[in-house]
Amino acid sequence: MIAGLSREEAARRLEEYGANVVAQERRTPVWRRVLQQLRDPLIVVLLVAAALTLATGDFPDAGVILLVITVNTVVGVIQEVRAERAVAALTALSAPAARVVRDGVECSVPAADVVPGDLVLLAEGDIVPADGEVLDAALLLIDESALTGESVPVEKTVDATSSSGTVSAGTVVVRGRGRAQVTGTGPDSALGRIAALMGTTPALTPLQRRLARFGRVLAAVTVALCAVVLALGLVRGQPVELMVVAAISLAVAAVPESLPAVVTLALALGARRMADRHAIVRRLPAVETLGSVTVLATDKTGTLTEGRMAAETLWTPQDDATVTGSGYGPEGRVARDGRPVTADEAPDLSALLRAAMLCNDAALEPLSDGDGRWRAIGDPTEAALLTAGARLGLDRAALERELPRVDEIPFDSARKRMTTVHHRPGGGLRVVCKGAPETVLRPQVLADPPDTLSRAAARAEELARGGYRVLAVAAADHDEAPPASHGTWESGLSLLGLVGILDPPRDTSRTTIAACERAGIAPVLITGDHPLTARAVAARSGIVARADEVTTGDRIRTGTAGDLTALRVYARTTPEQKLDIVQAWRAAGHVVAMTGDGVNDGPALRRADIGVAMGRRGTEVARQAADLVLADDNLATVVAAVEEGRRVYANVRRFLLYALAGGTAEILVMLLGPFLGMALPLLPAQILWINLLTHGLPGVALGAEPVEPGVMRHPPRPPEESVLGAGLWPRILIMGVFVAGVTLVAGVWAQSTGRPWQSLMFLVLGATQLGVALGSRARPGSLTNPFLLVAVGTALALQAAGVYLPPLRALLGTEPLPPVDLAIACTLSGLGHVVMRAQRRLFPERPPHTRSASAPDHR
């Protein structure tokens, strides 16, 4: 087998070093992390609520609240520690040892001991330990995709005037050997500069920002209303101690202390469902953030594309042909005019691909896992030629036996072509040459007529504009070796044709991008590849039209790119420029999701509102920096995850509608009851009991509601919109007024008929709220969330137990009710369900209207 290191093997070696992460960075003290978590406004409200419940002696309720706070704090600290491992992964992503020449003696030293001025020896399979200047190179080919995003390995030569004369730390030698003088290590290396960019702290998610604003408003409103209740009671002559306890109890009732539990459950269920759909959540709040995404910034290689090179288009002087199939395996076909052809049916294509397979140093082999996949060994461009030949039915081994190689002129960057010489079966030699069209389609090399050369040049230029990497292939037969072999091999050849090679878009790319557009998400492409390649992939995927402008990293650096949010494709970008692009979209008010797989993507993954890393081909640095990891490397999984994120946000709003409507009802009952002749409508213990039952299991169960139909047919909520926006406040007031009205009417009726009115109000208020919970379901009439049905049934039984069980009656100060009154309460709870469903139809939630990304729309 021809020697060479596959891209998969290179990625595996990088993975080995990146996976052995030892966190040596300076750590933040645990107590400081805990304090940072407790500064969240909603957590502050819950701490106050816990203190108030302790003051009232309601230890079970206080225990629940403190448990929620503890769980949220522990989870938050763990997530923060995990995020910091991204920087540690960068440190680990370097060779454990390097071969250097010091004082004329070759020795092996730890990579961390390499210093500027060292002479480093590089060989196939090595990870470059530091930045350096190439002093000597022999067919040196380096995979820089992890740092630059370039899908094609780069040849390195002795050229101090260009990037081809330098090597970067963390890249992998795919082929050849060389020597380099170290110019930068540690923070002065390419990896070090990226590590510095990784220092940004992830910002609050949209839901966290919304809940923080909501917590501040709720705290102020609650304090004000409770002060009013306290003042009214004192004016009416109620005991000071009783009214203070009542006001504190009402404050606890007004605070939806189950909200963190609801959010946590909804996020956890969303994370589990995402895992079932191959999306692994690393940071729990990221689940909801996905539902708020307005811009999806995607990488090209391995995300929109398959992450491999493929010979897709063939041209001969006779006609064009296309090659189809996926991966490097022989499964696929070569078609002309839509009809599959074989080597016998298309001798011109056979001659072209036979030559391309002979003038080739790559190899293909099946993977050992037995799933039918093949891997490329060596240059992926040459591997693409082997795959195309196999799909025409050609056998590489048989060709090499028939035409064994006897001489070659290796590829170099100056000539941009490679030539091999082979023994012919009947005697004589065959010369095969392949290379860049500008170096092969020349009269000095080819003996073809000028019109053939002009036609070939025009077709090559057309393919290049379409984003293809174009190779020209030529050959000639000689009866015997020319007198001066190497000087005359590359002349008098006949053009066999052109091959257009590219990293093909995934089959699902266009449908995924279309789904993003329907959901109001603007897709943009950020890549380190050539602008022509970037535009071609973006056009094929449906991101832009072919005529749209593509900006480059150089234009961003010089400030001539204009408004970055007015574009959809960014090529030749550096890690710093990816940061600039993400920040520009965020500054324009968008919620940005960024996908990536390389080390160079790490800073942008951290800066984005949500970072999405590739699980299979992604580097450890990208995975550690990301909030979400795609186990299948499929961008379509992001769209599925967005749906889960929207479900989470919808369930948070569903719970807030239910909980705040109940809290509003309790406040109105306590405010208006005294004006209807009820000195103290409900006792503090009764308020806390209702609050515990309604905000407990039923409230948490609402977080498990399924996704509503059509959720992906409208844009996300605007980032600046309140969590109670889009008409939720009026709906809360409507339901609060209704529940309070039903409760007060029942109380007045019971009072006028000599019934235990306070106990009836206690039962009606709790039961009606539970009816509202059933009316809040996303899919009424189904069994998609049986937990809610069980929770409501259990809460209703406990509410009735508060009236009938002697120990609870003594605790709550209630009296037993006759069966007729119990039936009335149950009927009124059903009325709560009916009115909740009716108001959803009469006052539907306003659909979101978010501004679209300022880029051309070609739908």
Image (cartoon, helix red, strand yellow):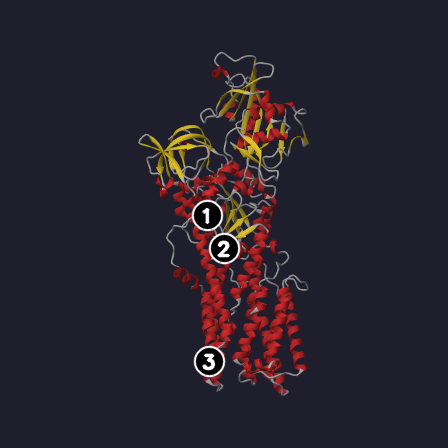
Q: Nearer the viewer, mark 2 or mark 1?
A: 2
Please determine whether, in this image, residue 216 is positioned above or below residue 332: below
The residue carrying mark 3 is: 244
Relative image position of residue 107 (x, y in whole percent): 36, 34
The residue carrying mark 1 is: 604
Decide if residue 594 is in sight here.
Answer: yes
Dot 2 falls on a residue whose secondary structure is loop
Relative image position of residue 702 (x, y in whole percent): 59, 65
- Label 3 vs label 1: CA separation? 52 Å
Question: Looking at this view, is 313 or 181 the one in front?
Answer: 181
- Dot 1 alpha-carbon crowd within 10 angstroms: few under 14, some 14 to 19, many 20 or more: many
- Label 3 vs label 2: CA separation? 42 Å
Q: Nearer the viewer, mark 3 or mark 2?
A: 2
Residue for point 62% across, 28% down: 320
The residue carrying mark 2 is: 283
For marks 2 and 1, the one nearer the N-term is 2
Question: Looking at this view, is 274 or 500 the one in front?
Answer: 274
